[in-house]
Amino acid sequence: MPARDPEEVLAEIEAQIIPELPLSVVLLGMGEDMHTASLFPGAAGLGAALASGAPVLSVFRPDSQPEARISLSAPILDGALSKHLVIYGESKKKALYHALPLPPEQAPVQAVLTAITVHWAP
C-alpha cells in the first residue's frame, strides 16, 4: 500500500483518539530547542496547534526533520490527567529553565508545563 499524506488520515486517527480523551498519562521529552511532541519552535502551523481551540492532531513539516510529523495538539497534551517530562543532561536542564519565561510560540514545551512532573537525570 503506498504511503499517504498525513493530512489524508487525520480524521481517521482523531476518531480513534477522541473517545479516549482526556488522556490518562502523557510522557514527553524535550529537545534542546525546547520542542516537545513534534511541536517545533517556528514550525508552520504551530500557532494553530497551540491555540485553545486547536484540533486534536496537527501535521508539521519542520525544516530540521526529514519527514512530516503528526502530533497531538498542545491543549490535548496539556489536558492529560497526569503529565511527565523526561529530560537528560545539563543542556536540556538549561533549555527547560530557559523555556520557563518564554511564550509557547518560542518554547513549545511551555504549553504543557502546568502541573507537570519533571524527571531529570544528569
Image (cartoon, rainbow, N blue to C red):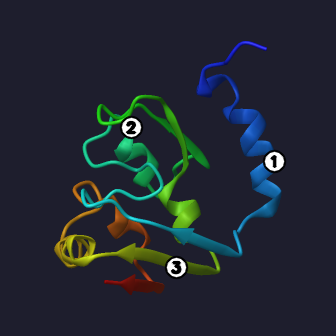
Q: Is residue 25 left or right of residue 73?
A: right
Q: Residues within 10 Å of mark 2 (few under 14, many from 20)?
A: some
Mark 1 secondary-structure assignment = helix
Q: Residue at x 67, y 34 (%)?
A: 10
The residue identified by callout 1 is 16
Q: Is residue 15 left or right of residue 117?
A: right
Question: Disc 1 or 3, which lies upstream in sequence?
Answer: 1
Between label 1 and label 3, give the one nearer the viewer.
3
Q: Position of residue 2 (x, y in %)?
A: 72, 12
Q: Residue at x 42, y 84 (%)?
A: 118
> Which three-letter amino acid code belongs to the residue tagged 1?
Gln
Between label 2 and label 3, give the one nearer the viewer.
3
Q: Is residue 97 left or right of residue 27?
A: left
> Which three-letter amino acid code belongs to the residue tagged 3?
His
Q: CA distance from mark 1 to mark 3?
A: 23 Å
Residue 92, quarter of the rendered image: bottom left
> Which three-letter amino acid code belongs to the residue tagged 2?
Gly
Q: Residue at x 57, y 71 (%)?
A: 27
Q: Position of residue 37 (x, y in %)?
A: 48, 55
Mark 2 secondary-structure assignment = loop
Q: CA distance from mark 1 to mark 2?
A: 23 Å
Q: Are marks 2 and 3 in contact (CB under 8 Å)?
A: no
The residue identified by callout 3 is 84
Query: Disc number at residue 45?
Result: 2
Residue 100, quarter of the rendered image: bottom left
Q: Position of residue 58 (x, y in %)?
A: 53, 41
Q: Residues within 10 Å of mark 1 (few under 14, many from 20)?
A: few
